[in-house]
Image (cartoon, rainbow, N blue to C red):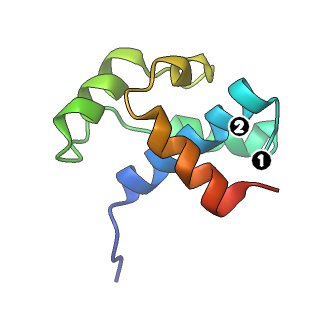
Amino acid sequence: MVLYNKEIRNRILISVYAYAYEFLNESLIDDYEYDKLAQEIDVNISTNNMMLDKFFNDCYVSYSGSWILKHPEIEKIVEIYNKYFKR
């Protein structure tokens, strides 16, 4: 039984990975893993967060991480990075 929304989880992860790479020049995962996860993001799935659903629908592209520069909740991504991923 899955106790979390897979799309939300994937969007958070891809955002943290893109943040680390674009802002900190740090690769948390290899390119193959990033590309695989990036392809799994489905911007047509509603996460019940209208702002982030619109952002992903309008700005997200799977072939680049530069969309993270426009993320409307970048401070939350930084917080997640610092709490769970900072080396």
| Position of residue 38 measured from the top left corner of the image (x, y, whole percent) | 56, 36
Quarter of the figure that contains the N terminus: bottom left
| Position of residue 34 measured from the top left corner of the image (x, y, whole percent) | 68, 40
Q: Amino acid at mark 2?
A: Ala
| Position of residue 2 measured from the top left corner of the image (x, y, whole percent) | 36, 76
Which residue occupies the foreground of this view, 39 or 83? 83
The residue located at (54%, 35%) in the rendering is 39
Tell me, for residue 14, which label it has, or none: none
Circle 1 Cα neighbour tier, 10 Å, few/some/many (<14 / 14–19 / ≥20):
some
The residue located at (63%, 20%) in the rendering is 64
Residues marked 2 and 1 touching at CB (< 8 Å): yes
Q: Amino acid at mark 1?
A: Leu
Vertical order, 9 against 47 (above or below): below
Quarter of the figure that contains the C terminus: bottom right
Tell me, for residue 28, which label it has, or none: 1
In the displayed structure image, the side of residue 13 where residue 26 appears, left or right: right
In the displayed structure image, the side of residue 56 where residue 51 appears, left or right: left
In the rendered image, which residue does mark 2 sit on? 20
